[in-house]
Image: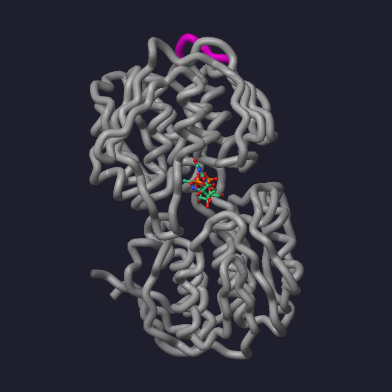
Amino acid sequence: MEKIKITGGNRLLGEIDVQGAKNSVLPILAATLLCADECVIHNCPDLSDVKTAIKILRNLGCSCEKTGKTLVVDSRNVDNCEIPDELMREMRSSVVFLGAIIARCGKARISSPGGCELGPRPIDLHLSSLSKMGIKISEEYGTLLCECCPEIVGTTINLCFPSVGATENIILAAATAKGITIINNAAKEPEISDLADFLNSAGARIYGAGSDTVVIHGVYKLHSTEHTIIPDRIVAATYMAAAVMTGGEVRLNNVMPSNMVSIFWAFNECGCQIEPSGKSILIKSNGRLKRIPTVRSLVYPGFPTDAGPILISMLSIAKGTSVFVENIFENRYKYIDELKRFGAKIKCEGKVAVIEGVEKLYSAKVCCTDLRGGAALALSGLAAEGETILSEIGHIERGYDDIVGVLGRIGAQIEYI
Ligand code: UD1
């Protein structure tokens, strides 16, 4: 099994391009099923989760050709409505294929996604919303069987929590449904808007994506289209942290500053300087990072839960004590025991982490527990002097396109071993 070796302590300097967003590309790949034609997706990152999504599409009967960062999906010949158990297990977010498969095939069969590294991840909101749209859902020995009875019908859905995945599944099921679907208390994440932009470019009529009320007028069918995936705001935050944790200065190209307001707020609070200019930003620290008294993860536009591990790694070397409150996932702090191996002083209780900044981190042998937790460990490795070894790096590869190459190009001593 490959590992990553980081020899920390180098100041990171230079320029990087930020990859396309994982959380956009996955639902958009599911959405290609609705087009029943050829879709061209640009800025498609090379990630293991994207590879899994491609395997799912091929299994359903699509042909997928990737050249560089452009993926062409031809979904004309879809002839299967089932996602095999092993592919569901490879990627929990495969559940976003559910709405698209039912819309395309009239039925779907997937295994229940179950829990994941972040704790239990129920899909009750997905299922209750789909059943309100006339989809019959039953569960047999851990397999979900869904069928249109006889068609998907638009309705008003009031979500009790603005779930990203549930909002996406409803949009996918509603785009070609009969009538109008209204989602109240919808998720507002930029990746929802990207999905709606993709579908609208294929002929869908989706209004209000990015606000808390999304209205979808079902259309008879969609057609071929071409779309460019938005930049990944969490990956951008990771490379921003890499710059400031090493006392460096990095220009990030291909970012959308308007999607990153709460992330910029946190970096500014830590004393970092961010100079946005169009789709690019220059980030640098002004000496030692400062504490942030309290940060809470919230749904968009609040501080993203996925950037929590990155910020906690930063705060572990800030001057003073900070508090992070994780409000979205129940069990997101598994990586913290590994961060402590670098000498970080962090105490967790329930959803609260208290981070007492230390002056220096020490290199360590650590094990990635999840995607963003793994990124946080890589960041601590860059800041710590000496040789750090990261194992279980498959978690990182789910969401970072060539992290070793990107960090290497701005001066990090990092390699696969
Ligand atoms: C998506 C993102 C993930 C991000 C999260 C929150 C993708 C592929 N993943 O995940 O990176 O961390 O949004 O921004 O886009 N919940 C329920 N019942 C449901 C659905 C969700 O209780 O039916 C709960 C979850 O357990 C969790 C919270 O709602 O506690 C947020 O989940 P949700 O917004 O659905 O996140 P995901 O779509 O799974």
- Magenta region includes residue 36: no
The correct choice, above or below, for 211 with respect to 264 in the image is above
Name the residue at 57% across, 18% down. Answer: 155
Please state the horizontal and vertical placement of residue 187, each as a whole percent of the image.
61, 39
Depth check, front residue: 291 or 260? 291
Q: Is residue 13 visible?
A: no
Name the residue at 72% across, 54% down. Answer: 261
Instruction: Name which quarter of the figure residue 188 lies in.
Output: top right
Please state the horizontal and vertical placement of residue 104, each as a whole percent of the image.
37, 20
Please state the horizontal and vertical placement of residue 412, each as a whole percent of the image.
48, 76
Depth check, front residue: 94 or 128? 128
Name the residue at 45% across, 85% down. Answer: 341
Depth check, front residue: 134 or 345? 134
Q: Is residue 375 left or right of residue 281?
A: left
- Magenta region includes residue 221: yes
The correct choice, above or below, for 383 with respect to 170 in the image is below
**Is the magenta region chiefly helix, strand or loop?**
loop
Q: Quadrant of the N terminus?
A: bottom left
Please state the horizontal and vertical placement of residue 330, each as a whole percent of the image.
52, 59
Magenta residues, as a range? Answer: 217-222
